[in-house]
Amino acid sequence: MKLNFIDNPSITFIKIIAIAFITVIYSFGGIFLITGANKYLINNFYDKTDEELEKKSTAQHFGETTAILALFGILAYIGRNVLQLIPFPLDGVYGFKYMDVNEVSSGALILWILLNYSPILANKINIIRKRLSLLI
Protein backbone atom coordinates (compact mmCIF):
# COMPACT_ATOMS: atom_id res chain seq x y z
CA MET A 1 0.00 0.00 0.00
CA LYS A 2 2.36 2.71 -1.26
CA LEU A 3 -0.04 5.59 -1.71
CA ASN A 4 0.93 9.16 -1.18
CA PHE A 5 -1.25 11.89 0.26
CA ILE A 6 -2.26 13.24 -3.15
CA ASP A 7 -3.42 9.81 -4.39
CA ASN A 8 -5.76 9.29 -1.45
CA PRO A 9 -5.81 11.77 1.45
CA SER A 10 -8.39 9.66 3.34
CA ILE A 11 -6.01 6.67 3.49
CA THR A 12 -3.17 8.94 4.57
CA PHE A 13 -5.30 10.38 7.37
CA ILE A 14 -6.30 6.89 8.53
CA LYS A 15 -2.63 5.84 8.43
CA ILE A 16 -1.68 8.78 10.65
CA ILE A 17 -4.39 7.75 13.13
CA ALA A 18 -3.14 4.14 12.95
CA ILE A 19 0.42 5.26 13.74
CA ALA A 20 -0.80 7.24 16.75
CA PHE A 21 -2.93 4.26 17.86
CA ILE A 22 -0.09 1.75 17.62
CA THR A 23 2.37 4.13 19.27
CA VAL A 24 0.15 4.38 22.33
CA ILE A 25 -0.60 0.63 22.41
CA TYR A 26 3.04 -0.43 21.92
CA SER A 27 4.32 2.19 24.41
CA PHE A 28 2.03 1.09 27.22
CA GLY A 29 2.68 -2.56 26.34
CA GLY A 30 6.43 -1.94 26.47
CA ILE A 31 6.15 -0.16 29.81
CA PHE A 32 4.16 -3.08 31.19
CA LEU A 33 6.73 -5.59 29.85
CA ILE A 34 9.77 -3.75 31.16
CA THR A 35 8.22 -3.27 34.58
CA GLY A 36 7.52 -6.99 34.85
CA ALA A 37 10.87 -8.00 33.39
CA ASN A 38 12.83 -5.78 35.78
CA LYS A 39 10.90 -7.04 38.77
CA TYR A 40 10.54 -10.75 38.00
CA LEU A 41 12.88 -11.87 35.19
CA ILE A 42 16.16 -9.99 35.39
CA ASN A 43 16.21 -8.72 38.98
CA ASN A 44 18.85 -11.33 39.90
CA PHE A 45 21.26 -9.74 37.40
CA TYR A 46 21.21 -6.43 39.27
CA ASP A 47 24.39 -5.86 41.29
CA LYS A 48 23.11 -4.14 44.41
CA THR A 49 26.47 -3.58 46.09
CA ASP A 50 29.98 -2.79 44.93
CA GLU A 51 31.07 -6.11 46.38
CA GLU A 52 28.62 -8.02 44.15
CA LEU A 53 29.73 -5.95 41.17
CA GLU A 54 33.44 -6.62 41.71
CA LYS A 55 32.89 -10.31 42.43
CA LYS A 56 31.75 -10.88 38.85
CA SER A 57 34.22 -11.06 35.99
CA THR A 58 33.85 -8.95 32.87
CA ALA A 59 32.95 -12.12 30.97
CA GLN A 60 30.15 -12.81 33.44
CA HIS A 61 28.83 -9.27 33.00
CA PHE A 62 28.97 -9.77 29.21
CA GLY A 63 27.09 -13.05 29.57
CA GLU A 64 24.41 -11.52 31.76
CA THR A 65 24.03 -8.59 29.37
CA THR A 66 23.71 -11.00 26.44
CA ALA A 67 21.02 -12.96 28.30
CA ILE A 68 19.10 -9.75 29.08
CA LEU A 69 19.29 -8.60 25.44
CA ALA A 70 18.10 -12.00 24.19
CA LEU A 71 15.23 -11.98 26.68
CA PHE A 72 14.21 -8.49 25.61
CA GLY A 73 14.17 -9.60 21.97
CA ILE A 74 11.88 -12.48 22.86
CA LEU A 75 9.63 -10.27 25.00
CA ALA A 76 9.38 -7.71 22.18
CA TYR A 77 8.39 -10.47 19.74
CA ILE A 78 5.73 -11.88 22.05
CA GLY A 79 4.48 -8.43 23.00
CA ARG A 80 4.18 -7.38 19.36
CA ASN A 81 2.24 -10.50 18.44
CA VAL A 82 -0.16 -10.09 21.36
CA LEU A 83 -0.68 -6.35 20.87
CA GLN A 84 -1.33 -6.78 17.14
CA LEU A 85 -4.46 -8.70 18.15
CA ILE A 86 -6.02 -5.46 19.40
CA PRO A 87 -8.29 -4.44 16.53
CA PHE A 88 -7.86 -1.07 14.86
CA PRO A 89 -11.31 0.50 14.47
CA LEU A 90 -10.63 1.90 10.99
CA ASP A 91 -9.15 -1.28 9.48
CA GLY A 92 -10.80 -1.84 6.10
CA VAL A 93 -12.17 1.70 5.74
CA TYR A 94 -11.42 2.90 2.17
CA GLY A 95 -9.46 -0.33 1.72
CA PHE A 96 -6.96 0.56 4.46
CA LYS A 97 -4.96 -2.41 5.75
CA TYR A 98 -3.78 -1.86 9.30
CA MET A 99 -1.20 -4.66 9.23
CA ASP A 100 0.49 -3.07 6.19
CA VAL A 101 1.65 -0.11 8.28
CA ASN A 102 5.37 -0.60 9.01
CA GLU A 103 5.07 0.64 12.57
CA VAL A 104 2.49 -2.05 13.30
CA SER A 105 4.31 -4.97 11.71
CA SER A 106 7.81 -4.16 13.02
CA GLY A 107 7.10 -3.70 16.72
CA ALA A 108 10.40 -1.82 17.01
CA LEU A 109 8.93 0.63 19.51
CA ILE A 110 8.41 -2.16 22.05
CA LEU A 111 12.05 -3.24 21.81
CA TRP A 112 13.21 0.38 22.02
CA ILE A 113 11.27 0.84 25.27
CA LEU A 114 12.65 -2.40 26.70
CA LEU A 115 16.22 -1.40 25.88
CA ASN A 116 15.95 2.18 27.08
CA TYR A 117 13.91 1.82 30.24
CA SER A 118 15.67 -0.95 32.06
CA PRO A 119 17.91 0.35 34.84
CA ILE A 120 19.35 -3.15 35.21
CA LEU A 121 20.48 -3.25 31.57
CA ALA A 122 21.81 0.31 31.81
CA ASN A 123 23.81 -0.68 34.90
CA LYS A 124 25.29 -3.69 33.10
CA ILE A 125 26.26 -1.58 30.10
CA ASN A 126 27.93 1.00 32.37
CA ILE A 127 29.91 -1.71 34.14
CA ILE A 128 31.13 -3.19 30.86
CA ARG A 129 31.94 0.26 29.44
CA LYS A 130 34.01 1.18 32.53
CA ARG A 131 35.90 -2.08 32.45
CA LEU A 132 36.61 -1.83 28.74
CA SER A 133 37.80 1.77 29.08
CA LEU A 134 40.47 0.52 31.49
CA LEU A 135 41.69 -1.91 28.81
CA ILE A 136 41.75 0.53 25.92
Image: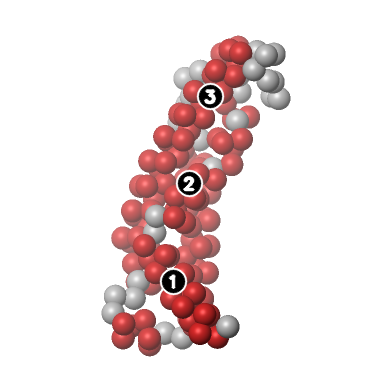
10 displayed left or right of 41: right
Residue 92 visible from this viewpoint: no
Q: For the residue marked with disc 2, what is the amino acid? A: Ile
**Where residue 84 sits in the image (x, y, percent)?**
50, 35
Residue at 48% in and 46% down = 110
Mark 3 crowd level (few <14, some 14–19, many ≥20, 10 Å Cα): few
Q: Is residue 93 above or below residue 81?
A: above
Figure quadrant of the N terminus: top right
Which numbered dot is residue 87? none
The answer to whether mark 3 and mark 2 are in CB contact below 8 A is: no
**Where residue 129 sits in the image (x, y, percent)?**
49, 74
Location of mark 2 (residue): 110
Q: Place residue 11 in its image quadrant.
A: top right
Which numbered dot is residue 126? 1
2 displayed left or right of 123: right
Which numbered dot is residue 16? 3
